[in-house]
Amino acid sequence: MTSSLHVSLPDEMRAYVDLRTNGKKAFATPSEYVRALIRIDMEKESERLYVFGELLKSVEDIKNGRIYSAEEVEARSKSFLDEIGKQDQK
């Protein structure tokens, strides 16, 4: 299902959208361009929530006296960054 959304833009922004959607660039229509921008924003928000969740887990670990060695922190960090990288590739 789709629905419409009317958006008012200043002339300068409209001109930019027109440049990005002239059919020769990555986006054929303004709607396609806006949908892509919204998807990117949604992905970034998802990543922010993931990072926040991981920080909360770390706070709980500290509160509960769980302390990790430098090697464990490094391994967890690498795993965490790998996971974010996988999300970026989607």
Image (cartoon, rainbow, N blue to C red):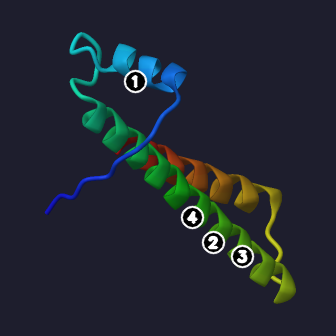
- Amino acid beneath label 2: Gly
13 vs 39: above or below = above
Looking at the rendered structure, the secondary structure element under dot 2 is helix
- Amino acid beneath label 4: Tyr
Upstream in the sequence, badge 1 or badge 3? 1
Q: Between marks 4 and 1, how big is the CA–CA gap?
A: 31 Å
Q: Which is in the foreground here, disc 4 or disc 1?
A: 1
Residue 30 spot, x, y in % from top left: 30, 31
- State whether residue 86 appears in this view: no
Q: Which quadrant is home to the C terminus?
A: top left
Residue 76 spot, x, y in % from top left: 65, 59
Q: Between marks 4 and 2, how big is the CA–CA gap?
A: 5 Å
* Residue that appears at 41% across and 47% down: 38
Report the residue marked by disc 1: 17
Q: Do the residues labelled 4 and 2 touch (CB within 8 Å)?
A: yes
Looking at the rendered structure, the secondary structure element under dot 3 is helix
* Residue that appears at 69% across and 77% down: 57
Residue 3 position by quadrant? bottom left
Q: Do the residues labelled 4 and 1 touch (CB within 8 Å)?
A: no
Residue 24 spot, x, y in % from top left: 24, 10
Residue 70 position by quadrant? bottom right
Report the residue marked by disc 4: 50
- Amino acid beneath label 1: Val
Report the residue marked by disc 2: 53
Report the residue marked by disc 3: 56
- Amino acid beneath label 3: Leu
Q: Between marks 1 and 3, how big is the CA–CA gap?
A: 39 Å
Residue 49 position by quadrant? bottom right
- State whether residue 66 appears in this view: yes
